[in-house]
C-alpha cells in the first residue's frame, strides 16, 4: 500500500508527466497540484493526458491552463453527457445542487465551493464540487458533521421547495450513511458506543477480505450502532433543513441562477449570496 502524494509531490508528478508536451506559459503546476487533493500518480497522469486531448479537440498548438481545468472537471465530475431533460427535472436538479451549495457556504469550517453545475456529467444530472484549501490528515467530528449536512442539503432542498423527495439523492444518502457508520464504528464519535473501534464499515484493498473477517461485536451492539448511525444522519439533515429554511430567498436565487447559467464558479456563488443578503437587509 502506497500513501497518496501531498501537493508538493503531486506538483513534481505533474511536471514529470508533461515532459514532451507543448505547454502554454499560463500553466500553473502549483495551483493544479493544490486543486487535486487525493489524486494518485495514475490520476495525475490521466489528468495530463486528458488535458492534451482537450487541447487537441480544440485544434490548439499548446496545452493551456483552461485545458487542464476542463480535464480536471471531466475526471472529478465526469464527462459532459448529451441528455434531453424536462423543465421540471432541470428545476429539481437546480434546487438540489443549490441546497448542497448553500449548506456548504453557511457551515463554518466546511470545504469551500469550487464549482456547481447542472450540466449532466457521468451518472449525475448535476454536481456541486468542493475543494479543500489544503490536504487533510485529520477529520474532526465538527467537520464530518458538516460534510453530512452538505451531503443531505440537496435532498432537504427538494423537500422544502417541492414538498417531495426524489431518487436523485441516492448517492448522497449512500455517502452519508457510509460516513456516519465510520464515525460510530471506527472513530469513536458516538457517546453511546464509546471510544472503541469495532471494525464495521472498514474498506479493504483486497477482494473478499472483509467477508472473511469475524465480527467483533454482538447483535445487541450492531443494533445500537444502527440507532446511532441513524441518529447522526437525522441530526445532520435537521441542521441542513434549518439553514435552507432560514435562507429560502438565497436558495431560490441560487437555483434561478443555475437554471439560467447552468454552471456557477465560486465568485458567482458569492455574488448571488451577497446580493440576496443585501436585498433582505433593504427590506
Image (spheres, grey):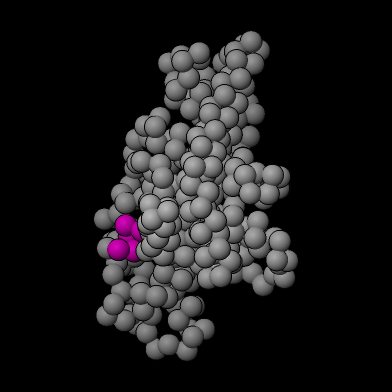
Residue 205 versus residue 220 in the image, above or below:
below
Q: Relative to 19, is 183 on the left or the right?
A: right
- Would you say the magenta stretch is mainly helix, strand or loop? helix
Residue occupying the point 64% across, 10% down: 220
Residue 12 versus residue 208 in the image, above or below:
below
Residue 81 rendering spot, x and y as whole percentages: 64, 69
Q: Nearer the viewer, residue 165 or 60?
A: 165
- The quarter in which the N terminus is drawn is top left
Q: Which residues are magenta?
A: 31-35
Q: Nearer the viewer, residue 28 or 4?
A: 28
User: Does residue 183 appear in the picture of this structure?
Assistant: yes
Residue occupying the point 44% across, 35% down: 144
Residue 111 versus residue 223 in the image, above or below:
below
Total marks placed: 0
Taking the magenta stretch, the answer to whether it contains residue 74 is no
Residue 77 rendering spot, x and y as whole percentages: 53, 60
Residue occupying the point 51% across, 52% down: 249
Q: Quadrant of residue 201?
A: top right
Residue 2 rendering spot, x and y as whole percentages: 39, 45
Q: Nearer the viewer, residue 97 or 129?
A: 97
Residue occupying the point 62% across, 65% down: 120
User: Does residue 47 appear in the picture of this structure?
Assistant: no
Q: Quadrant of residue 153?
A: top right
Residue 257 rendering spot, x and y as whole percentages: 52, 65
Amino acid at each position: 500500500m502506497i500513501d497518496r502524494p501531498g501537493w508538493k509531490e503531486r506538483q513534481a508528478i505533474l511536471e514529470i508527466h508533461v515532459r514532451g508536451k507543448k505547454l502554454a506559459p499560463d500553466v500553473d503546476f502549483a495551483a493544479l497540484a493544490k486543486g487535486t487533493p487525493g489524486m494518485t500518480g495514475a490520476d495525475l497522469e490521466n489528468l495530463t493526458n486528458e488535458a492534451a486531448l482537450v487541447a487537441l479537440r480544440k485544434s490548439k498548438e499548446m496545452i493551456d491552463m483552461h485545458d487542464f481545468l476542463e480535464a480536471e472537471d471531466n475526471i472529478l465530475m465526469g464527462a459532459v453527457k448529451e441528455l434531453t431533460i424536462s423543465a421540471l427535472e432541470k428545476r429539481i436538479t437546480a434546487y438540489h445542487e443549490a441546497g448542497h451549495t448553500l449548506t456548504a457556504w453557511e457551515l463554518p469550517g466546511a470545504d469551500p465551493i469550487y464549482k456547481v453545475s447542472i450540466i449532466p456529467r457521468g451518472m449525475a444530472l448535476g454536481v456541486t464540487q468542493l475543494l479543500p484549501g489544503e490536504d487533510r490528515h485529520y477529520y474532526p467530528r465538527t467537520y464530518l458533521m458538516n460534510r453530512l449536512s452538505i451531503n443531505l442539503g440537496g435532498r432537504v432542498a427538494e423537500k422544502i421547495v417541492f414538498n417531495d423527495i426524489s431518487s436523485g439523492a441516492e448517492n448522497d444518502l449512500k455517502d452519508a450513511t457510509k460516513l456516519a457508520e465510520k464515525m460510530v464504528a471506527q472513530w469513536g464519535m458516538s457517546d453511546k458506543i464509546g471510544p472503541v473501534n469495532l471494525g464495521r464499515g472498514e474498506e479493504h484493498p483486497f477482494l473478499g477480505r472483509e467477508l472473511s473477517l469475524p465480527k467483533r461485536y454482538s447483535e445487541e451492539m450492531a443494533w445500537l450502532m444502527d440507532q446511532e448511525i441513524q441518529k447522526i444522519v437525522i441530526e445532520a439533515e435537521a441542521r441542513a433543513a434549518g439553514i435552507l429554511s432560514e435562507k429560502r430567498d438565497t436558495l431560490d436565487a441560487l437555483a434561478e441562477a443555475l437554471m439560467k447559467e447552468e454552471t456557477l464558479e465560486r465568485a458567482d456563488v458569492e455574488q448571488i449570496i451577497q446580493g440576496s443578503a443585501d436585498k433582505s437587509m433593504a427590506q
